[in-house]
Amino acid sequence: MSKPRVAMVVQRYGPEVNGGAEDAARWLAEALTTIAHIDVLTTCALDYTTWADHYPPGQSQHNNVTIHRFPVDSPRNWQQSQLKTGRLLLSKRSLDEEMAWIREQGPFSTPLLQFIKQQAGTYDAFIFVTYLYATTFFGLPLVADKAILIPAAHDEPFIYMDAYRALLNMPRHIVYLTEAERDLTMRVAGNGRIPHHVMAIGVTPPDNISPDRFYQKYGIEGDFLLYSGRISEAKNVPELCAFFQRYRREHSHPLKLVLTGKSYLTLPDDADIIPLGFVSTQDMFDALSAATVFVLPSLFESLSIIILQAWLVETAVMVNGHCKVTRRQCQRSQGGLYYTSYDEFAAVLDRLLTDEPLRRQLGENGRRFVQHHYAPDHIADQYQRLLHSFTAATPNQFK
């Protein structure tokens, strides 16, 4: 049986890109090279706030994946964009106004959309990653009969727009990353008739993980909380910093907060808050294994890959309980605790810092959960069956 040809459409792509959905897309593209010919169709953008071209346009190869990059029609002004978004969400709007806003939010690339339309017959399937961006919104309808959508949706205002509800009813198949995402999307979009599965992604750690190497490289000693991801208001990092500083004022434990990832805000001038910037995958796993506790303050997630990575190295986690997805991950795995207020944050942190056997048990529970549900070979097998249904005579034979 010949391998199917699959195009993955995603707004940004590359090892330098800092974003959960983009990390998932890159892992999946590379994992699927064992069962399909994978082309990634993406923009030249690196920074999601501006979508300004960063990579050169054209074709390249990385880890057996063929990457086609297309220039963005025009970058966006982040401040103006935020103002327009606020006005749109607070107003009564038409479908045309929503579509115009999606185009302005971007990244909108006419050459990318032209390529999808012209090469539609070349591919057996198109995988679109994230519902939110213009690459998916304007690209998926061009090949809806061959489209697999990975929405990466969470309970945010945008998903309730009429334009997105229509989009969520278009693809031939939907892959949800978690049950919570599936339940939300079906409730909002009423798209239960669309064939779908919950398949998530696999998680593969580096071969050599060393907490000592992290301590030595960055000169960090003692207990520390770790956050990894975009350092932004959207990820609720300001609240995390405020909670941490209040905790340090009220408790004698010499704790530090270490943050990795690109920063989009000004952090407090505090010697106990240590931003390391964007780090390599190796350094990130070393940090996860060295951390006393991993903390995720985000209110909106469709799947937290970084939590899965923390559990793989048996690190206990604490998450914002207002995020249904991460709270449910902790409940299902018994690998972490959650908080919904500062008082709960302090109580959970106290318990984790003073109870090493509990931390160890949570980490072990998390590792078993990830190994059972997110084994790369198992997920590749699921996708192989799904892609076979796209090339078989009768569609949607995936069971």
Image (cartoon, rainbow, N blue to C red):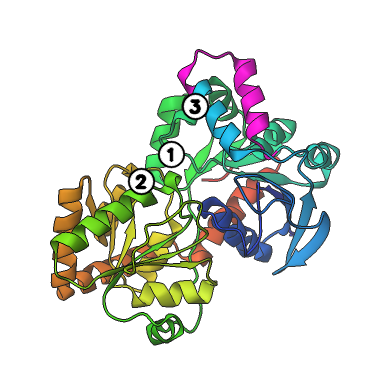
Q: Amino acid at mark 1?
A: His
Q: Which mark is on residue 325? A: 2
State the SS at label 1.
Answer: loop
Are the residues at dot 1 and dot 3 in contact (C-beta closer than 8 Å)? Answer: no
Mark found first going from the N terminus, 2 or 1 = 1
| Upstream in sequence: badge 3 or badge 2 | 3
Residue 180 position (above or below residue 353): above
Q: Position of residue 114 (x, y in %)?
A: 83, 37
Name which quarter of the figure residue 62 lies in: bottom right
With respect to residue 368, does 115 lie above or below? above
Circle nearer the N terminus (1, 3): 3
Residue sitting nearer the eye, 115 or 379? 115
Residue 244 in picture, x, y percent from top left: 26, 58
Label 1 and label 3: CA atoms lie apart by 18 Å
Q: Whole-Å distance between the Cαs marked 3 and 2?
A: 25 Å
**Residue placed under numbered mark 3 in the picture:** 86
Is residue 214 something that shows in the picture? Answer: yes
